Amino acid sequence: VQSSAQNKLSLPNQISEMVRRYRQTQLKQRVRLNDIWAAFFKAVGDEKDMLVAEPGPGFAPDKGGREMVTPQEVINRVHKYMRVSVPMSQAKRGLVQARNAFESKDFV
């Protein structure tokens, strides 16, 4: 238990992060992850197709439900479907964190 608790934020740090994110959202320097998810969902139309490796509607036949996404593609897709501008720094940071999570777990 203690080993997993070592890399957790303290309560004051968590509150500070929440306030920072709130302020960034109000200043349009940040986009909610729900909006980014919704943009990708609108492009594909089915959550299961987004998560499987077989071909599905909205994807090229050779890619299935997986595709490599660049920060610019995140920005373009969210703007196209949600009419919201994602800052490049947030798009890059989100993709780096997603890659790290993918590599640290046993995803299929």
Image (tube, rainbow, N blue to C red):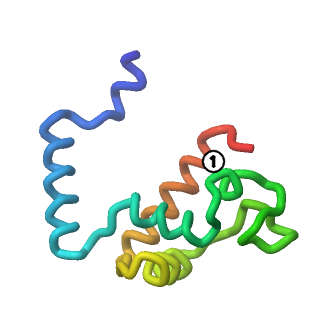
The correct choice, above or below, for 97 with respect to 78 in the image is: above
Between residues 6 and 106, which one lies in front from this camera angle?
A: 106
In the picture, the quarter occupied by the C terminus is top right
Q: Residue at x 62, y 54 (%)?
A: 47
Figure quadrant of the N terminus: top left
Q: Nearer the viewer, residue 22 or 34?
A: 34
Mark 1: few, some, or many residues within 10 Å (few <14, many ≥20)? few
Amino acid type indicated by mark 1: Glu
User: Percent from the top left, x then y, of residue 55?
Assistant: 83, 62
Question: Could you say which quadrant of the image residue 56 lies in?
Answer: bottom right
Question: x, y (%) of residue 42?
Answer: 55, 69
Quadrant in the rendering for residue 66: bottom right
**Which residue is depicted at the point 37% across and 74% down?**
89
**In the image, farthest residue toward the front:** 45
Q: Where is residue 87 drawn, in percent x and y?
A: 35, 78
The residue to which callout 1 is attached is: 103
